Amino acid sequence: MNVVTTVIKSRHSVRKFKPETISDIVIKDVLECAAQAPTAMNIQPWLFGVIKNKEVLAKIAATADHGKFIAECPLCFAVFGEKKETYYLEDCCAATENIILALQAHGVTSCWVAGDKKAYAEHIRTMLDVPGTYTLVSLIAAGIPAEISITKKKEMKTIVFYEGFKTD
Ligand SMILES: Cc1cc2nc3c(=O)[nH]c(=O)nc-3n(C[C@H](O)[C@H](O)[C@H](O)COP(=O)(O)O)c2cc1C
């Protein structure tokens, strides 16, 4: 194990946060990590929104069916992808995971909230004045954890195969 794998393995989705704000130095570093994600043909088809305003957070929470806790988080990132680019979804998911792991490295917990495929994606886009050539891929609620619950992961032997898949 090294420091990066320890950060990855220590991450859990957190939905209850303390009211403490997250510093702009951390936010800048996290955004730079987002922009560092790999993208198909290096197109980088994304926009990253940073939302700290309580009223805007409450409006996002009101529309996100499984993201009501966004109203109580001190910080939320919104990742938008350029729809015309074939791999915008993969690219923006890579950036989303970079955001989550960079936050974790700074001791800031988070939860990925679905954007793409959600009926509210368009509503959040217009609310944030994002051009119609983009679509919401993810919201990332973030903050210092008030409560952490640990989910059960599948056993490695049930999800990994080497060379070729065998059933025995
Ligand atoms: C694409 C995607 C969409 C998700 N959407 C939501 C969501 O809308 N609301 C929520 O509370 N959690 C959401 N999650 C978080 C998952 O529920 C969480 O990752 C899963 O339960 C495993 O828990 P863990 O992140 O602690 O390992 C989403 C995760 C992914 C990858």
Image: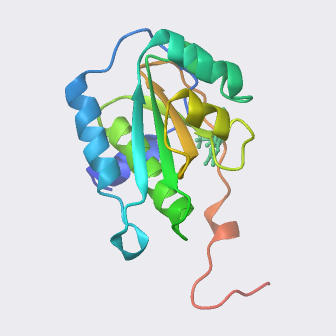
The x and y percentages for residue 97 are 45, 50
Write the residue at 66% across / 27% down.
67
Lateral position of residue 5 relative to residue 60, left or right: left
Write the residue at 55% across / 25% down.
148
- Between 98 and 153, the residue placed more toward the observer is 98
Lateral position of residue 63 relative to residue 21, left or right: right
Write the residue at 37% across / 28% down.
108
The x and y percentages for residue 42 are 34, 70
- Between 81 and 39, the residue placed more toward the observer is 81
The quarter holding residue 43 reads bottom left
Picture quarter with ligand 1: top right
The x and y percentages for residue 90 are 53, 63
The x and y percentages for residue 77 are 45, 34
- Between 159 and 136, the residue placed more toward the observer is 136
Is 51 rendered above or below residue 119?
above
Q: Quadrant of the N terminus?
A: bottom left
The quarter holding residue 26 reads top left
Is 61 rendered above or below residue 103?
above
Lateral position of residue 2 relative to residue 7, left or right: left
Write the residue at 59% across / 14% down.
58
- Between 92 and 4, the residue placed more toward the observer is 92
